[in-house]
Amino acid sequence: MDMPMVLARIEERLKAVGLSADAASRAAGTPDAIRNLRRAVKNGGRQGVTMTTLAALAPVLQTTAGYLLEGGESPAMFDAVSDGRRPTSIPVVGKLAAGVFREVIEHDDGDQEFIFDEPDPEFPSARQVAFTVEGESLNDLKPRPILDGDKLICVDFDDTGLPLIQDMIVVVQRTRDDGRTLEWSAKQVEIHPGRTEFHPRSTNKALKPIVVPDDPDTDTGERVEVIALVRRTSYALPKAPPRRR
C-alpha cells in the first residue's frame, strides 16, 4: 500500500466534500484515523491505515475504498447521481430537550458532528441542519413517534419561504435572560384565533405547549422563534444489539 498516495487521495476528497480530517474521521467512526495516517507518512512509517478504515472513510468522503487505495479515473462513487442528489454533510448543531435551558456558547467547530444525506428534494437550496432528540417530547406523535436518541434532519425555516401550517413539526427556539439562555425543542404546530401553540405529543403529561399570542406587544419574558422545519428522522443502530438474557 502506497501510504503517501493514499493520504494524497484522502486529502483531495476532504477538500472536495469540505470536511476537516477530524470531522471526517469521527463521521466514519474512526477517530484520529487521518491524523494517524498523516503522522505515519511524515515519519516514513508503513503502518498507517487499514482496508477496514478506508472502507469506513470512503462514504464520508463520497468515494470508494478502491479509489482511496489505488486511484483511478473517477474519485466519486456518485457519478451516476445527479448533483441535486449527491449526499452532503449536515452539521448536528445541538440537542432538542423540552424544558432544558442552556447557556448560549460559541460552538467549537473542532467538536462538530456531521451526518450525511442528500439535499431535501422539496427545498434543494435550503440550508440543512440536524439535531439530536433528548427526552420524550414527541414520543407519542402520530402516525410515528420521535424517540430519544433520534436525529432530526431539518431545513432552515426561513429558507423554506413557508408560513406556519397546522400540524407542522418544527424546531422551536425559546430564549430567556435577554438571550443568554435558550431551549431547543421539537413541537407540533396548532393554529388558533389570536395565538399559535407549539405542542409536545408525549406520554409525559407534565410537558406543556408553548403558547405565542399574535399580539406582538405581549411581553412574556421570552422570545420564541421557529428555526427549522423537521423533514426526516435518522437513527443509527448498534453494530450488534445487546444479547437478551
Image (tube, rainbow, N blue to C red):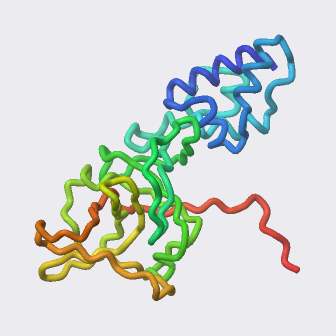
Residue 198 x/y as whole percent: 31, 75
Residue 120 x/y as whole percent: 37, 52
Q: Quadrant of the N terminus?
A: top right
Is residue 99 left or right of 229 when viewed as pictured? Answer: right
> Residue at position x 12%, y 79% from top?
194
Is residue 168 left or right of 29 when viewed as pictured? Answer: left
| 129 w.r.t. 14: above or below | below
> Residue at position x 28%, y 61% from top?
225
Residue 218 x/y as whole percent: 15, 71
For this rendering, which residue is in front, 103 or 56? 103
Residue 166 x/y as whole percent: 24, 76
Q: Quadrant of the C terminus?
A: bottom right
> Residue at position x 39%, y 48% from top?
128
Is residue 105 left or right of 4 when viewed as pictured? Answer: left
For this rendering, which residue is in front, 210 or 50? 210
| 125 w.r.t. 148: above or below | above
| 244 w.r.t. 1: above or below | below
> Residue at position x 76%, y 58% from top?
239
Q: Which picture quadrant has residue 49?
A: top right
